[in-house]
Image (cartoon, rainbow, N blue to C red):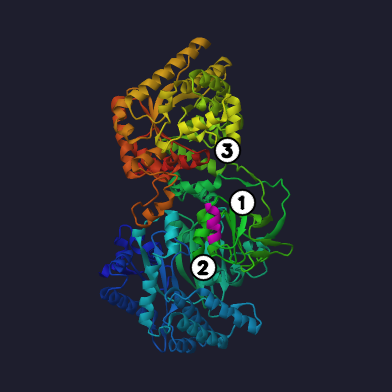
Amino acid sequence: MNKLILNFKSKDSKKIKNPKNFLGGKGANLSEMGRMGLPVPPGFTISTKVCELFYKDKKKLNSKIVNIIKKELKIIEKEVGKKFGDLKNPLLLSVRSGARVSMPGMMDTILNLGLNDKTVLALSKKTSNSRFAKDSYRRFIQMYGNVVMGVEGYHFEELIENYKLTKGVLLDTDLDADDWEGLINDFKKVIKDQTKKEFPQNVYNQLLGAISSVFLSWESNRAKVYRKLNQIPAEWGTAVNVQSMVFGNMGNDCATGVVFTRNPSDGVNEVYGEYLINAQGEDVVAGTRTPQYITKKARKDAKAKEASMEEAMPKVFKQLDKILKILEKHYKDMQDVEFTVENNKLWMLQTRSGKRTSKSAVRIAVDMVKEKLISKKEAVMRIDPASLDTLLHPTLDEKNTLNVIANGLPASPGAASGKVVFTSEEAERLNNVMQDTILVRVETSPEDIHGMHAAKGILTARGGMTSHAAVVARGMGRPCVSGSSEIDINYEAKTFKTSSIEIKEGDIITIDGSTGRIILGEVPTVKPEISGDFSKLMSWADNFRKLKVRTNSETPLDTKTARDFGAEGIGLCRTEHMFFDEERILSVREMILSKTVEDRNRALAKLLPHQKKDFVQIFKIMNGLPVTVRLLDPPLHEFLPKTEKEINDVAKVVGLPLKEIESRINELHEQNPMLGHRGCRLGISFPEIYEMQCRAIFEALSELKIKKIKSAFPEIMIPLVSTEAEIRIMKDLVVRVAKEVQKDKKIKIDYLVGTMIELPRAAIKADDIAKHAEFFSFGTNDLTQTTFGLSRDDSGKFLNDYLENKIFSIDPFISIDDGVGDLIEIAVEKGRKTNKKIKLGICGEHGGDPKSIHFCANAGLDYVSCSPYRVPVARLAAAQAELSKKN
């Protein structure tokens, strides 16, 4: 039981195998800094194991844990020479959460714990600073009232604003001891009115209440949303750090700040951060006051007047700068550090690997290899593949005339356009109906997490570069402009004003998180240049990976994009996507609704040149690389005419009465089309459809070969096979058409014929199917649907309930489920047993999911295929999968 709680200086923490798992990230790093001899205020960590016990004991701290906490407090008291609850020299504490991974703003923090109506007088006398003591007490009541007693924060904020208005001042620091005394009494009245309980005066009750609240915050809605977005397991729990307070709000020789060892936005190797004189840590991150810059250079670059820390506190800055270098060298990564200065003495409150943009992550990793801090392998392993998405999307096209209506801080790079919304709920509602939004808030709080995720970008009126909005947006890869003092937000009227214009909810704006510009209307974007550090990192990844990466594409534009991103072929060319063009759809409908083979062939003859033209373009772009062409797969109902106009148009082309067309549509209707007449079943019923497609493929290849243009290597995929007979019949068809074209054109064409494994029976009978297939491509979207009996289109209505009840740890349509994985492994083993040379790949949406890519590498697949913009993500994930095997 004693090992469940550890002092920061305890040597036992060295013996823990995975300290972050047990002590949480914050506790592990505080312990590490303590052992390194850095100035860390004394304290102890209540481990994640206690969190587990807390929930097992019906959300209560058992008596044994309480006794250990009291013993640990005695150690702190001895070290700092103060006593908890003492009426002469009181010890005050901070109580902070600390999960295994950083969850900025998601979990609860309480400062100045141990103050009550009596100890506040002792603190006032001891420091000879009545204003500071009362300010600290009102902060504690405010935090404790909100976090532990559940009083909404605005009740306290409104009272402070009223006091400032009455006194005619702008800042909290302009209020004096008498003002805080009045607010203390008002705050306690608010708590009594809202909770029917008195604010607790017993300091031990305060401490146990705070610790319990931190554990409870692990199951808060905002923490659950954050865990879901970042795939953090609920069973991890959080640790709690109890630490003696140091004060940044005792006067002008005190300060608090947040600093990064490098710039988290662009990765430049320079100290980056903000601080506030005469403040506590929450003031910096909450955005209630506009912070000042840490370095003189940053202040000058921003053309700010307020002195930087380097200028205002030169000695302390030098000490901080030295510690930052020590920490970065020790952890071999960019650090995000919180510090406090009390009476010109520097204290380190926290260090962690800093959240950063994708651009910054890549630059830092490459620079640290140059600096010999880390190896190329470590650089490749360090980048989250999913985060690369934000590097691969367009930025503003500067050639356009931009109507800049205001500016703010460039808090998270990237550009986004959308309708202005003022609540997270509205952002989520519009996102559900496929509308892009920009979430506009005075400042964001952890309660806005769902809205920030739903919105395309975030704009705030207050807060700096390390505010909640900035940190969370960077972590999510959302563009963000923060601290725009040029906008005035009116939540009630649902508007914001600038000096020149009023913007209403629903109006479209664009934000540029790279420059801080706020622009009226929608602005066109341009494709990013993928070069420099990014190219270098990708080349390292390519050297380490064995898994090939292809793309899912059927248009020349997507094919070129994918090739530019490093695709090594096409793993899925969905031929049906070529049919939806307005000119072609009529011929498709004519073909489907025809009753005779002759009529169907007439319609197919119209489609043949279109298919051939598409294949020529794609094969040309992918010269020298494999292209897997899937023959027609979807159910026929997707092509059928639906509106009156569409039915009339088809009737004219086919030359049949309207009633007969309607009757034919009814004949083709299926109750469950996704399990109906589709895939190879169409080829069995209407072989002429597949014959036309194969002819288009082989004629396109012949044309390129005759013109001596280097072409792609074709792989013909038969979809929805579940029996040996289906693949045998369909392969015979492909081979026959290939022979006919080769004979006609007097040319030889090399090709493969294979199938998509997307049905459980196909996986189980893979040894039989492999007798006729030269490759398997796993269609994991349908394989997941048919394994679970789940409709991907409808399951969204209840999948959240399954995630909430921990039936699924992650949506099986996002990451390969282990049951589906078992079927893939069975198919791999049986397929290779029959055909040692069989080529194996995956082409479902899972092909771009890093976790699924790890599975594919371990299962022995040859390649993954994903959408064009996910190709770099897959390349990096494939390298990490290979390196993980060796580790």
- How crowded pointer 2 is (Cα within 10 Å; few <14, some 14-19, many 20+) is rated as few
What element does badge 3 sit on? loop
Quadrant position of residue 161:
bottom right
Magenta segment, prevailing SS (helix, strand or loop)? helix
Q: Which residues fall within the magenta stretch?
A: 425-432
The residue that mark 1 highlights is 415
| Residue 37 pos. (x, y %) | 41, 67
Instruction: Judge by depth and name the residue closer to the eye, 313 or 360.
Output: 360
Q: Earlier in the sequence, mark 1 or mark 2?
A: 2
**Residue at 61% across, 27% down:** 652
Q: Is residue 761 above or below residue 851?
A: above
Q: Residue visible at 38% across and 57% down? A: 804
The kind of residue on which mark 1 rests is: Ala
**The N terminus, quarter of image:** bottom left
**Residue 429 magenta-highlighted:** yes
Q: Secondary structure at mark 2?
A: helix
CA distance for labels 1 and 2: 38 Å
